[in-house]
Image (spheres, grey):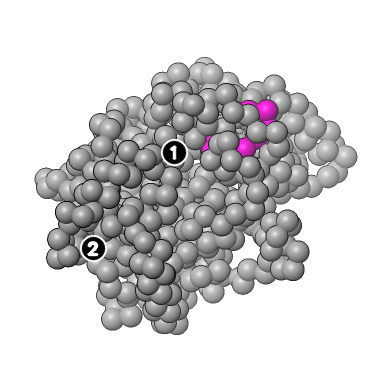
Amino acid sequence: MAKSEWSFKSAAELSAALTAKKVSAVELTQDAIARIERHDGKINAICVRDFDRALAAAREADAALARGERKPLLGLPMTVKESFNIAGLPTTWGWTPQKDFKPAEDALSITRVKNAGGVILGKTNVPVGLGDWQSYNDIYGTTNNPFDLGRTPGGSSGGSSAALAAGYGPLSLGSDIGGSLRVPAFHCGVYAHKPTYNLCPTRGHTPPPFPAIPMERDMAVIGPMARSAADLTLLLDVMAGPDPLDLGIGYKLALPEARHHALRDFRLLVIDSHPLLPANADIRGAIEQLAGQLSGAGASIARESPLFPDFTEASRLYMRMLMSFLGAFLPPDILAGARAGATQLSPDDKSLAAERLRGITSTHQAWVFDEGARAGLRAQWRQLFKTFDAVICPIMPTPAYPHDHSPEQEKRRINIDGRDHVYPDQLAWPGIATLTGLPATAVPLGLSKDGLPVGVQIIGPFLEDRTPLKLAELIEREFGGFVPPKAFDD
């Protein structure tokens, strides 16, 4: 089939084409549906199709455009992570017992997307409980990376990243607590933004069958994914703002503008090493090249700073606090095993695995002290951002790796430059922004020597989301961004 001129365009480009009547919303939706039907047998990104309602929404969008209406997402086909409630469609989070659960109403973020004119094609695949950097479950099977079908697309928003890379619409919605927006974006060479904590209300991004009520889930956020940096801001502005059922009663959102609008004005701290988990040669090389490009464009680049928080202690704290939250939802037999294991830990065992075990079995008193330590970290970051505008660092230590569905993640290994490391220790890199609720934008930097995407995250100051987003946009404009996978670039 001849290559469509629309499949890999940005949302901004498609909106301009719709306004200029160069294409219709129905045509864009049909193009995306045709790509899904043509390619998704191999990729398996779209686990729930909603094509009839998508086409109906596209027809409504065309009618609105003909009336002269303008909305941020009007007529744009897009996908949504399976974990978001959409009325009439299953929400399972990959749990087999919930395979027939269908919510009665949309998540708040979905309502906002629809009100902005977005055309939802369907839902994208996830790992069980959103708890892996691979996206497979017994209900919907395995999602593959469009750049190499034998490798993970990332997780837990892996279906969304694979859908974007394969040309199934320019936008998607995802979520993140352990890198679940940034990691799949990195593994599939697309963009994602982990917003400042609680910037985008999560009502309706709810584990089934729990009710969709306003609730803060510690460190967990929802956010936008796209093939272009500017499109992240477009979708974030639709999703962001307090829930009208609680904080919205008294608060309104007023995000500050980006600190700078030219590369030469940015003061950047570039980090490529971690004392507990190195990044491999591919990632370090990509960061080195980017640092050189940014310096050449006039940006101020530092490679170290005494203001940077203790990376080792921050990673240990993140592991405890993350698993203190996630561990609350573990089955009784797993919890019992964790308690038994924790009693065997030596006080001198400061490995990240030991900290995860301590977190699962943490008392509320221990959590309160950890929360105090986190407040101290936030204060350190505030000081750092008086000297620097953003921090650039890895998202993960290696490009996408082969599928590994062995059941115990603590026994899996990730190979970094010939040396094996504990699989969940990779949490250290995305955790740098997650622990303190900072905004972080995933930016692709081309392909490795093996043809796999590489990239970085840009971490910005609390509630200054527009600063890392603007820097990502400038990097894309000056040095390039998304590269389509050759096998699916048709």
Type of amino acid at the residue the image marks with label 1: Gly
**Of the image marks 1 and 2, the number of the one nearer the N terminus:** 1
**Residue under circle 2?**
274
Q: Tell me if I can see residue 484 in this picture.
A: no
Compared to residue 99, the image places residue 308 above or below, namely below
**Residue under circle 1?**
129
Q: What residue is rendered at 57% in x and 24% in y?
A: 100
Dominant secondary structure (helix, strand or loop) of the stretch shown in magenta: loop
Camera-side residue of 203 and 27: 203
**Around disc 2, counting alpha carbons within 10 Å, would you say few (fewer than 14), some (14 to 19), or many (20 or more)?**
some
Residue 89 is one of the magenta-drawn residues: yes
* Residue furthest to the left: 418
Residue 400 position within the rendered picture, expressed as x and y whole percent measured from the top left: 30, 40
Judging from the image, what secondary structure is the residue with disc 1 in? helix
Residue 153 is one of the magenta-drawn residues: no
Q: Are marks 1 and 2 in contact (CB under 8 Å)?
A: no
Compared to residue 169, the image places residue 182 above or below, namely below
Give the extent of the magenta segment: 80-90
Q: Tell me if I can see residue 232 in this picture.
A: yes
Left/right placement of residue 199 relative to residue 448 reads right
**Around disc 1, counting alpha carbons within 10 Å, would you say few (fewer than 14), some (14 to 19), or many (20 or more)?**
some
Compared to residue 93, the image places residue 440 above or below, namely below
